[in-house]
Amino acid sequence: MASVTAQAMLEAGNIDVTRLRHHLRRVDPAQVRVSVAPAWFRLFWPKGIVAVCMAWAVYVQPEIMDRYVRRDRVDSIGTLIAHELVHLEQWRRLGPIRHSIRYLGDYFVGRLRRLRHWEAYRAIGLEREARYVAAVITAESRR
């Protein structure tokens, strides 16, 4: 499968799209494509990254799409896609320049504070927001 809508992945992962839209007003999951990232693109991803949100789509590692097709552990895929859509909301709210400055700035501040890569990554304000909002959406969807 080359690509699918974010909405299809969310629904497979038991995420209530109506609840998601309540939190992410600038994002329509039916209009966002989720595709397997090309091999050349994945070469630039740090080890452990399974998805990346760009302004036009969400790209995932091949095993994520395989799990979706097999309907294997799709609950975690729903949360992952919700997390990536929070990043799209952030991008649209802040614009590409402010988003990039905040994201990279937080990371580099963490590294200057001598945090290891993953610690600095987890400390990025926009990542913390994405984890929190995705967790809220997931919890609301599963009530």
Image (spheres, rainbow, N blue to C red):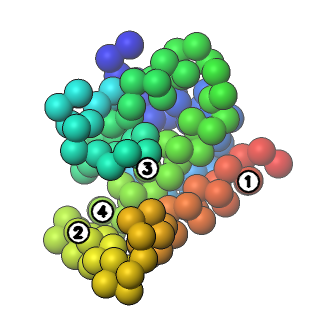
Residue 109, quarter of the rendered image = bottom left
Contact (Cβ within 8 Å) of mark 1 with mark 3: no
Judged left or right of residue 11, residue 118 is left
The residue beneath circle 4 is 91
Helix, strand or loop for disc 2: helix
Q: Could you give the CA–CA distance between mark 2 and mark 4, rounded to whole angstroms?
A: 8 Å
Pick whichever of labels 1 and 3 is earlier in the sequence.
Answer: 3
Q: Is residue 47 left or right of residue 131?
A: left
Q: Earlier in the sequence, mark 4 or mark 1?
A: 4
Q: Which residue is mark 2?
A: 100
**Contact between labelled residues 4 and 3, with CB atoms less than 8 Å apart:** no
* Crowding at mark 2 (Cα within 10 Å: few <14, some 14-19, many 20+): few
- Position of 63 relative to 60 (above/below): above
Q: What secondary structure is marked by label 1?
A: helix
At horizontal 59% and vertical 45% (from top left) the residue drawn is: 79
For the residue marked with disc 3, what is the amino acid?
Answer: Glu
Q: Secondary structure at mark 3?
A: helix
Mark 4 is on which residue type? Answer: Trp
Q: Which of the two residues, 135 or 45, is positioned nearer the viewer here? A: 45
Q: Position of residue 11 (x, y in %)?
A: 60, 31
Label 4 and label 1: CA atoms lie apart by 24 Å
* Of the image marks 3 and 4, the number of the one nearer the N terminus: 3
> Any mark on residue 84, and which?
3
Q: Is residue 124 above or below residue 34?
A: below
Q: Residue at x 52, y 15 (%)?
A: 69
Q: If the image is split into quadrants, where does the N terminus sit?
A: top left
Q: Amino acid at mark 1?
A: Glu
Asked whether residue 34 is in view, the answer is no
Q: Position of residue 136 (x, y in %)?
A: 67, 60
Mark drawn on residue 140: 1
